[in-house]
Image: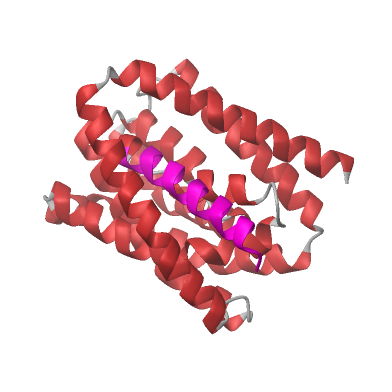
Amino acid sequence: MEARILYFFALAFLMAGMVKGLLGMGLPLVSITLMSILIEPKVAIPFVLASGIVLNLVQVIQVGGVLAVTKRFTSLAIAAAVGVWVGTELLFAVDPRVIEILLGIIVCGYVFINIIRIPPTLPKLWENRLSIPAGLVFGVLQGATGSLAAPLAAWWQMLGLKKDEFVQASGYVLLIVVIPWSASLIVKGAVTWRIAFISAGLMIPAAVGMYLGGRIRARVPEERYRNLILALLFFAGLVLLGKGVAS
């Protein structure tokens, strides 16, 4: 892989880490979206595995209060872990252009969700009933596109999670999902030793970005920084849509 591509990937992971440090999620969404400007999404997806495992684990430990989160969201997380196998099958079975268009729609959808700020509307009873079906859908999206950030963010907003709960729940669910997702990609032969090595190296700029995102969140008005991130995501989503449609 050319050095210029690796430099671009490092920048993508730095920016993705900043988003994760600010919002608690979005590392695969941003990094895969940006990498997909140069390579196919299904080629880009394996590069996020190391960061997905390690940084989500760090996020869960940092926030604390794991017991309450596991009790409430384990059924959702396990369902997503099952769905991710189906999504991975789709990733290798469909035209890459379909993945690009789907990912572009998800990215723009994520921006739209954040702009309209969906109010909490889901009663506790329906949360229990819909956790498993929702988790399956989220897992399929994770496997097929490399990111479930958009629908998961919408789900958390519908449940009315507070900021710390949002970050904690995101880290926990994403950690549970990324493990079988990694296994499914390995089974499919998408992860070579070279890719694993690059993935581990990209964890460094991602971790730096996550730290910077947390610092910026504390020092800069969150709304202003949030709008900049959303503008970046919307632009990247439009690029993907244009690339998929024009191919």
Extent of the magenta region = 1-21
Q: Is residue 124 left or right of residue 183?
A: left
Which residue is at the front of the view, 201 or 246? Answer: 201
What residue is at 26 percent from the left and 20 percent from the top?
220
Q: Is residue 162 visible?
A: no
What residue is at 32 percent from the left and 30 percent from the top?
123
Q: Is residue 3 magenta?
A: yes
Q: Is residue 135 left or right of residue 239?
A: left
> Furthest residue to the right?
246
Q: Position of residue 74 (x, y in %)?
A: 29, 58
Q: With respect to residue 222, does 91 lie above or below?
A: below
Q: Is residue 17 visible?
A: yes
Q: Is residue 208 magenta?
A: no
Quarter holding the N terminus is: bottom right
What residue is at 63 percent from the left and 79 percent from the top?
188
Q: Position of residue 52 (x, y in %)?
A: 40, 60
Instruction: Give the quadrant of residue 236.
Output: top right
Q: With respect to residue 48, does 8 lie above or below?
A: above
Instruction: Give the quadrant of residue 46.
Output: bottom right
Q: Is residue 87 left or right of residue 222?
A: right
Which residue is at the front of the view, 32 or 207? Answer: 207
